[in-house]
Amino acid sequence: MRNSARKQLHNRSIKSRLHTLETSYLQLLGTGKKDDAAKALQTISSAFDKAAKSGVIHRAPADRKKSRLAIRLAKST
């Protein structure tokens, strides 16, 4: 049981980081800082890839999330 509790804590911290990165990215888009948002998108994409690689989240939702975030960057003016 200790092993699963340790893994659960680790996975939760990774998911929390993903949510934090996503909200900061959306705030940058909202304020119109497109250059900073582009850099943040690279960071988020890398984080989603690493989370999917380690099995924290599934590959398909990670790819879908990255795609939708990139589309939002492209649509922003």
Image (spheres, grey):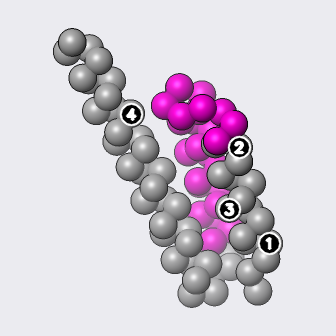
Which of disc 3 and disc 2 is earlier in sequence? 2
Q: Is residue 38 above or below residue 18?
A: below
User: Marks 1/3: CA distance?
Assistant: 9 Å
Q: Give the labeled residue for mark 2.
A: 63
Location of residue 71 (image quadrant): bottom right
Q: Residues within 10 Å of mark 2 (few under 14, many from 20)?
A: some
Q: Give the labeled residue for mark 3.
A: 69
- x, y percentage for residue 76? 74, 80
User: Marks 2/1: CA distance?
Assistant: 17 Å
Q: Quadrant of the N terminus?
A: top left
Which of disc 4 and disc 3 is earlier in sequence? 4
Rendered image: mark on residue 74: 1
Location of residue 25 (image quadrant): bottom right
Which of disc 4 and disc 1 is earlier in sequence? 4
For this orientation, the residue located farthest to the left is 2
User: Marks 4/2: CA distance?
Assistant: 18 Å
Relative to 2, 21 lies left or right = right
- x, y percentage for residue 24? 48, 69
Q: Residues within 10 Å of mark 3 (few under 14, many from 20)?
A: some
Rendered image: mark on residue 11: 4
User: Marks 2/3: CA distance?
Assistant: 10 Å
* Residue 31, magenta (yes or no): no
Segment tinted magenta in the rendering: 37-61
Q: Nearer the viewer, residue 33 or 57?
A: 57
Q: Quadrant of the C terminus?
A: bottom right
